[in-house]
Image (cartoon, rainbow, N blue to C red):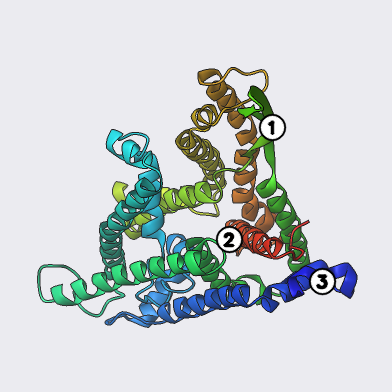
Amino acid sequence: MRAGQAATGQATGRPALIQAMIDAFRTPDLRARILFVLAMLVIFRLLAHVPVPGVDRAQLAGLLSGNQLLQFFDLFTGGGLRNLSIAALGVFPYITSSIVMQILTPVLPQLSAIAKEGESGRQRINQITHWLTVPIAFFSGYGQMLLFDRAGVFTHPVGFVGPGSLETLTIVVSFVGGTMILVWLGELITERGIGNGISIIIFGGIVAGMPQLLSQGFLARDNPGGLVMLALAGLILVYFIVVFNEAQRRIPVQYGRSVFRGGRMYRQTGATHLPLRVNSAGMIPLIFAFSIMVLPGTFAGFFANPSDSGFFSQSALFIATIFSPTSVWYWIVIFILVVVFTFFYTLIIFQQQQLAENLQKNGGFVPGIRPGLPTQQYLNRVILRITWGGALFLGIVAILPFFFSRVTGIQALTLSSTSLLIMVSVALDTMRQLEAQLLMRNYEGFLK
């Protein structure tokens, strides 16, 4: 009865968004799903504050304050790296494993055959992805320990040979365990909550780290004019993120089927469309580009010594300067890498979908295009053209902090545009899934 009445914003006088939220909490199963997501995020935040033993907090704070790579990962782990907790790696080993599997699936015949087995094949691919996450997390955790040990963060020797071997093994295993727990929480959110669990975990980490980033970045500075300009630019950026995230090219598709009626065979046709997204790669190219760009400057910074006139030290100092966010060349290379990675990742994902083959199997065809290979070639041309828009947009989003800092005079928030893109994308995806649940119950949704 309540679902049939379907109170809308017009009927109650409330805005549609607020009314949709009220409707969601009025529905018992949706309320349970939303509360379950919040509970999982609380557990995630608790894990981010469970530190590993033997850490010098003062040294760790000093290391993070001047290291762009560590600040980048700390933002996405919600402070897990800043606290050097068991969740210091976040879900990045799982994301890396997923990307590796997506790249290898069309290349290796064995994985390609497994992927074509339907639901059972997808489950096996997912299982292999989980197994691959463990060694990636292990080596990532150990590499992180070596990096921190060089900066004097640990109070005991680091290494698997010597007096500190047991402590090292304990901490690395804790890192791996923390990552796998977060992956498990993300899958529970996907199964019993709303939205994509892994994305929501990343979203929760960014949101949790934003207050401290804002306070350290520009709220503590006496620059009200720059703050207003930055806020306006942020609102404009959110608008364009929504536009490009929702933009798609709709390819008309017709389906034909034969129906036997009254002793005669009739041919029936139906029309629909195939949506090709302008930004199919999401935020993956940005993560790739920033991760690659901060590595050379980070490692060169350990060997750079301005007081040393030697060739090796001066070369390291030059590399550290070039790959610093204050360098113009840094942002030019970032833009190029984002564009290249957008095309690379989009084409890999698009080829795995096998749209032309699936259309032909289901009796579908694009009007004016022959089924099979001509359809695949046509779709390839379309996806290449529209991906230019998504690639250039992501490239501009990546370099916007550089222009913001020059225009507003605020030199903080180097990665804020990337964080904003991820937060808006995850929020839209979650709202879309919640809207589908509301519409199934005859409620008005979030999106118009």
Q: Answer with mark 3 or mark 2, whichever residue precedes in sequence.
A: 3
Q: Nearer the viewer, mark 3 or mark 2?
A: 3
Hey, which quadrant is residue 94 in on the image?
bottom left
Rendered location of residue 273, percent (x, y): 67, 35
Residue at image coords 52%, 42%: 333
Residue designated by label 3: 7
Closer to the camera in the image, 234 or 6: 6
The label nearer to you, 1 versus 2, is: 1
Residue 329 x, y percent position in the rendering: 53, 43
- Give the labeled residue for mark 2: 419
- Distance from Cα at disc 1 to Cα at disc 3: 34 Å
Give the label on residue 43, or none: none
Q: Residue at point 50% right, 75% down?
A: 41
Q: Amino acid at mark 1?
A: Gly
- Element class at badge 2: helix
Of the numbered discs 1 and 2, the one sitting upstream in the chain is: 1
Q: Earlier in the sequence, mark 1 or mark 3?
A: 3
Q: Nearer the viewer, mark 1 or mark 3?
A: 1
